[in-house]
Amino acid sequence: MAETTTATPPTAATPVKPNWPSLADDHALNAFHKRLSGILSDTGYAEIWGIELSAASPPPFTTFQILQKFLRANQNNLDKAAEQLGNTLKWRKEFQPLELLKRDYSSKKFKGLGYNTKVVVPDGTEKVVCWNVYGDVESIKETFGDLDEFIRFRVALMELTIQNLNIATSTTPIPDFSSSSATFDPYQAIQVHDYKGISFLRPDPLVKAASSKTIELFSKYYPELLEKKFFVNVPWIMEKFFATFKLILPAATTKKFVLLNKGSDLVKRLGSDIPQAYGGTKESLAVIGETVPLSAAESVSEEEAPALVPVAEAKTEESDASTPAAAPAVADAPVATSALASADAPVAAPAATPVAPEPVAATAAAEESKVEDEKKASEALAKEDGAAAAPAGAVATAEVIKEETSKA
């Protein structure tokens, strides 16, 4: 009788923990890690982007990944990187942004506004793409009227984007910052901002307030998370002015920004693995996109969630609703920290000088005349390729570009 044998089921391979390449004792990462114990002690908090930082030695791979993000954002300036990390941990301890992903948001206010997808680009790699579709806002007042609620929604969408980057399970070390050559960080997202139907001529003060607050928060607490940013369905004049600004901006900044007059031209950059509305082959973002939890009910109440905007600041913005305020100063923010932040909310034209209200008829006539003047000037500009004076809307567009790129 033939002897029978029992097959031994294969055992699951034990995951191999990634190791960081050997570093010199005086390397910036080692120096940063030596400070980490003090930073964690001072803040009383260790979580960032779903990762628990550790001061243990040898450092966990993911801890080095986070420290490297902050070093790159600050061009290897250790003091600035440590300060920014400390401030970020304090903010996360107070506001608990991961908890924002567990709450429902009003579909009436935020449906269709933001999505995440994963896209296989022409070189065969998979990218995380965060889509911001501002033209789908049904009511400016409903969506942006409650500044805290909008910011909670926007922070939740950012946290979702970061989760999709899989930094917590990453295995490829983020390279050192280099001032002489480009180094690629594989754990960054692509941003697409669709401005179809958005007016650059008459920005709403509620939108301006939301934009400014988003820029401020993201520039401080979400560094080095942008690979490239596409502005689509923007006025052709915006493309022209951006071409001018590229001559005076650092190449490291301008290479992250792409302006497209036609949304369907995005397929030329990202390939066909995107929705048909952008020239691809996929279904709409509403079908294939991932977003934060939405419900027919109103969003979480103020009593259940921390205010992301200090009370005094919120009152100031509310009282100044008739006059758009300038974007908050973030001069102390690192050069590279705001690239993702600066266009994560609808952008608006610069603040206007308060003036006495004009009669409705006079205001309407003035706007009509202004639009007509802009049309004529735009036609002249198109024919003479810059010989004509810049139209009013183009000036506002130029300010939009300046605000976006100055924080990249």
Image (tube, grey):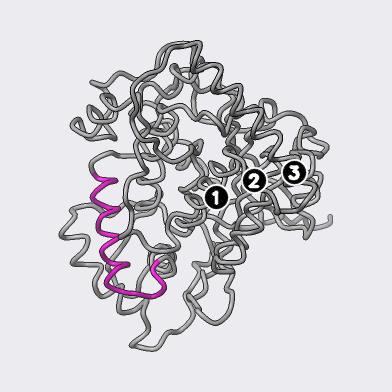
The verdict on residue 78 being magenta is yes
- Residue 3: x and y in percent read 78, 58
Find disc 2 in the rendering and name its residue: 238
Is 234 left or right of 278, judged from the image as shown? left
What residue range appears in magenta? 74-93
Which residue sits at x=37%, y=76%? Answer: 29
The tag earlier along the polypeptide, 2 or 3, is: 2
- Residue 152: x and y in percent read 38, 32
Q: Are there few (<14), some (14-19), or many (20+) residues within 10 Å of tag 3?
A: some
Compared to 199, does 123 lie above or below?
Answer: below
Is 263 left or right of 218, judged from the image as shown? right
Circles 2 and 1 in contact, beta carbons < 8 Å: yes
Find disc 1 in the rendering and name its residue: 401
The span from disc 1 to disc 3 (Cα, nearest Å) is 22 Å
Q: Secondary structure at mark 2?
A: helix
The tag earlier along the polypeptide, 2 or 1, is: 2
The span from disc 2 to disc 1 (Cα, nearest Å) is 8 Å
